[in-house]
Each structure stands twice: as C-alpha cells, then as structure tokens.
Image (cartoon, rainbow, N blue to C red):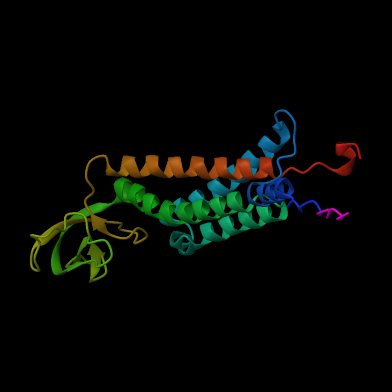
Amino acid sequence: MRKERRHAPPRRLAVPGLMEHLRTVLWGPAEFVGVPESLLAEGLLAGSTAAAAIVGAGFAGMWGGPPTLVTGEPGLVVAAALVLYLVILRAGWVLVGLVAVLGACLALTAPDVAAGVVLQQRGLVESARVASVETAADHGRIFCSVTDIDAVPAGAEVWRGCGKSTAPGDTLPVVYDPRGRAPARGVAAPGELRTAELRLAGLTAVFVAGCTVAVVRSFRMTDTQRGT
C-alpha cells in the first residue's frame, strides 16, 4: 500500500501582532481605559506652554524684546524641545512628526503676524520710490524694491501694492516701524491682519491638540496594571 504523505500545516505570519506593533510605533499604544484626565491635563499643559513660548517670543521680539527673537529661531528651539519630550514619552512617530511640522510652522508664522500687529499699532506711512520690480520665480509674486525713506533700508522689498503695472520711478505707500523692529511692507488691505491673526490662532489650536493627543496616546500600562 502506498503511504500517504502528511504535509506540514502552512506557516501563518503573525499579521495581527505585526499590525499591533506598527500601530503602537506610529500612533502610540493608548493603553488606557475610560477618560485619561491626567493625561489630557499633561498634554494640554505641555502644548499650551510650548505654544505660548513660541508665539510670545515672536511678539516680544517685534515689540521691543531682544532682536534675536524676531527671527523665529527661538520658537524652533522650543518646538524641538517639545518634540524631544514626546520622543522621551515614546509617543507615536506620526504624531511626533505632526507636532514637529506644526511647531515649525508656528515658529515661522508668529513673527510675521507680530510684525503686522506692530505696524498697525505704531507704524508710519510714507511714499517710497520704486527702484526695481521683480517677479519671484517660485510663486509668481511681484516684489518692488523701494527707497527714499530714511527709516527703511534702501532696497527693501515689498509686495503689497506692487503689481504688473508698477514700474521703476513710481511711488508706493509703505508702512514702516520707526523703531526698526518690524520689516517695512506695503499698506495691507482691510481685514488682512485679522485674517492672519485668525490663521495663527487656528494653527496654535491644532498644535496644542496634536501635542495633547500625542501625550494621551503615549500611555503604556505596567505589568502590574495588566495584572501579570
């Protein structure tokens, strides 16, 4: 009689275990039950403190603080410190990356909005002569290099009020900061600053929310809590 061959059962990949590991690495373990009030408080505190430091640095630099604050670099340092804090907590990499991107955007946006606020509060308006007109290759925005204002460095570039019909020798109204903190710019359209402030507020809220979610989802149960 011919013997029957017994085939070994096919090996099954531990797909559920692999997916669980990827979920933990990318999004955080989130091993909690119910509403994690303490984690929510910790995440909100970390995100709000970082956001206040980032935005506050930009406004302080423009208003009268150390000139180094107007560059946005101190805000980038704060954002990097927050990212390091999340890495130490072993938060999900997707959320850590999201917070890093939002923090960088916040650090670079805050000084620009702060400049608009400063120019609105203490800015002076004068007519400047257009020295040259150039079109940016990357986004097509038209820039005018202006001169003839003592408080504004010769060759300062503005884009508000500078259009295709603008030519060298024309004059443009330019608003500038007599203290020299905020860069000169063309006169803003009505409501433009309000829109920028709302955009900054929205970006801040998303930044704080992202940090909070990252902290909450970083929670891992100990062996005692698991009952092992």
Horizontal side of residue 126 vs 58, given as left or right: left
Q: Residue furthest top?
A: 34
The quadrant holding residue 81 is bottom right
- 5 within the magenta span: yes
Which part of the image, by quadrant, shows the C terminus? Answer: top right
Q: Position of residue 105 (x, y in %)?
A: 46, 54
Which part of the image, by quadrant, shows the N terminus? Answer: bottom right
Q: Position of residue 108 (x, y in %)?
A: 44, 57
Residue that appears at 47% across and 60% down: 72
- 64 within the magenta span: no
Horizontal side of residue 73 vs 95, given as left or right: left
In depth, the one of 49 and 123 nearer the eye is: 49
The quadrant holding residue 219 is top right
Horizontal side of residue 220 vs 115, given as left or right: right
In the rendered image of this protein, does residue 169 appear above or below residue 178?
below
In depth, the one of 25 and 64 nearer the eye is: 25
Q: Residue furthest front?
A: 1
Residue that appears at 56% across and 51% down: 99
Residue that appears at 44% across and 40% down: 202
The magenta segment is 1-7
In the rendered image of this protein, does residue 126 appear above or below residue 210?
below
Residue 60 seen in this snapshot: no
Horizontal side of residue 43 vs 172, given as left or right: right
